[in-house]
Amino acid sequence: MGPNIQSSYMREVGRRRIFVQVDTGNVLGLELDRDEKVQSVKKKVQAALCVPTEQSSLVFGDHELQNDLRQVRNDSPLLLARGLQRSSSTPCLSPTSEVSKPKDWSRPIELLGGPDNCYTIKKLIRASTKAIEKRMDPVKAGGGLGGAYFFKNSRGENIALVKPTDEEPFAPNNPKGFVGKVLGQPGLKRSIRVGETGVREVAAYLLDHERFAKVPATALVKVTHSVFNVNFDTAMSLRKGDGLPVAKIASFQQFIQHDYDANDHGTSCFPVSSVHRIGILDLRIFNTDRHAGNILVKNRSDGQRLFEKRHLGVNESVELIPIDHGLCLPETLEDPYFEWLHWPQASVPFSEEELRYINKLEPYKDAEMLRGKLPMLREACLRMLILCTTFLKMGASAGLCLADIGTMMSREVCGMDEEASEFETVCMLSKLEVEDVLADASVEGEKTFTDCSSEEQLLVDQFQFHMELGESWDGFSDSQSMLLGFSPSFSSCSGYSSPSTLSPRTSIYTCYDSLSFQHKLQPLEEEITETSAIPIKAVPTASYEQLHSPDKLGAVRSLSYMGGNHQSCSHLKMKKIGNVHGNSVKSASDPTHVLKNTSNANLTFLSDMSENKWRLFVEYFQELLQDAFTNWKSKKASLSQKLGTSCQF
């Protein structure tokens, strides 16, 4: 049966393949029947890997799969995460007699996620597979805090770098002693979970449109080989011996021949355009780890330089290649690190070509693309991409250079402390504004019904009574409709097919509030949320300087971003200290407090926001950015000297 016929057959019968990774790192490939359930998958994993599955969840990115697996696509990687830690006295359950041990029929290297129809990746996978079949084993790579392996072709040349997700720093099978956590827990950066750097490597490649920054081709794969590291505790639990093949999920990146990295050479010879292109990518993905060691430098041959000078009008002696993007797209606000920030090239204005590229970027389209190609990437990461790309586009339109935008996204170091960056400040002010708008709207809605007449209250009570009983409702008369404030044409509430479509927390007052603004109720397809019926207020007209005053920034400057846990920040004792265009602004009890050794819980809002709050947040964010950039430019103009302006290129 040929591959095309086999794929067609699998679609007809509804069969598909998934790859389940347990939190200790090992991976099992499974073929699913049309109606297979989560419990069946857990039993197969338990039978094959001898791991307990009673208190575990099958996780797919942000989503915990309850029972139905129909939403899971073919070749999707899933994580079997334990909800409770098993004590040492709890024995590892043996496979049940009714479930036979499944066999993994997948090939040595299987493509799980990344670019569609990427010739380079497919060619590298075929070459690596042939080399493995010829006993050309991969070689461990030195350096770094995690496990990495050079995969070769049949001639013994390095062609790909593979990084297993369970060998990252703090992951269960880290070969360099940095262990102690299971997959899915906060990792080297608290905003990036253990085991999720590989998917970010792929995201960086997918976002490098037109190979603008020259990120090497990267994909997410499932790879099986005996060279991979398995620590003793994991090997004992999986009953694996030395030298036996082990399957892992890993990033698979094209190996680029180079002469040295940016650590080994002065930066003055680096082309302005190359520095700008890497910087533009880093700003978009909020890279928290762009150091000189992950910028490869490749000398250009005389022939190559001559060709480019004649045909492209450029004469660059070296080429820069960015690698290692596993610590980008954090789930929460972090302090980015841009090695190029104080290079003189970063202070040179963007070229026309670079401005055209930035102008063509579409953050929402990019986020949708990543949802399709990397559905395991969390929604908070996609929202971070949208914010950072918006920040870059508006900053470039305002005439800022790469160094300006990077500085505004980076925290200011004051002695041993750090203060929030301009980017973080705008984010937190936007968040506070959204909270105040929704709080004010809620209070206004309550006032509306507090002042209603007894006749109005009776009508509302009748409506609520019928809705709770699930009985049909003949609607209001025209005079009653006019009394309650909505169109007489709304003669019935047939839009509500059942009270079950309403959230238990949604009162009749929320329904009435929605009717009074929409006049015509559409059939409900999703559960109504508490904020879905709240009218959206206009974007504030207050200036950035008003919001940016020291007393208004007390809350933002005292919020923590470091060293805390994801718990509430009640110890900050927030209090009202001012008012901006009718909306309250909160501050900490100590306005002079800076960011140091406190909890970062208030910055987990990217994942906590509902869709309505997120849309309103972006509106405030964009409005406040305009004033922020204007304020930045005026401060910059007042400086007597700017770093790097004396350099000529």
Image (tube, helix red, strand yellow):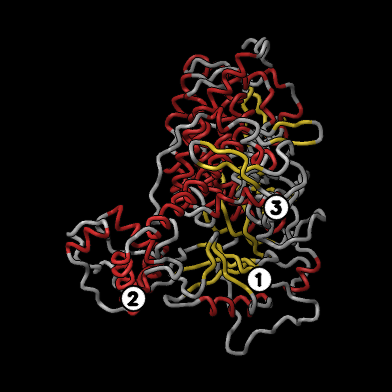
Q: Residues within 10 Å of mark 3 (few under 14, many from 20)?
A: many
Residue 304 spot, x, y in % from top left: 56, 21
Residue nearest the viewer, comparing 123 with 270: 270
Instruction: Identify residue for label 1.
Output: 83
Please report the residue visible at 64 percent of the width from the left and 34 percent of the height from the top.
551
* Quadrant where the image shows the C terminus: top right
Separation (CA) of disc 2 from disc 1: 41 Å
Residue nearest the viewer, comparing 389 with 596: 596
- Kind of element beneath mark 1: loop
Q: In this view, does 551 lie above or below 135?
A: above
Q: Please identify, in this view, whether the residue under mark 1 or under mark 3 is nearer the observer.
A: 1
* Quadrant where the image shows the N terminus: bottom left
Q: Please identify, in this view, whether the residue under mark 2 or under mark 1 is nearer the observer.
A: 2
Q: How crowded is mark 2: few (under 14 residues within 10 Å), some or many (20 or more)?
A: some
Instruction: Identify residue for label 2.
Output: 465
Residue 42 spot, x, y in % from top left: 58, 77
Residue nearest the viewer, comparing 30 with 443: 443
- Kind of element beneath mark 3: loop
Residue 630 relative to residue 180: left or right: left
Q: In this view, does 60 lie above or below 274?
A: below
Instruction: Identify residue for label 3.
Output: 138
Residue 32 relative to residue 128: left or right: left
Residue 523 spot, x, y in % from top left: 28, 64
Quarter residue 225 falls in: bottom right
Q: Residues within 10 Å of mark 1 (few under 14, many from 20)?
A: few
Q: In this view, does 371 lie above or below 522?
A: above
Residue nearest the viewer, comparing 187 with 245: 187
Q: Earlier along the polypeptide chain: callout 3 or callout 2?
A: 3
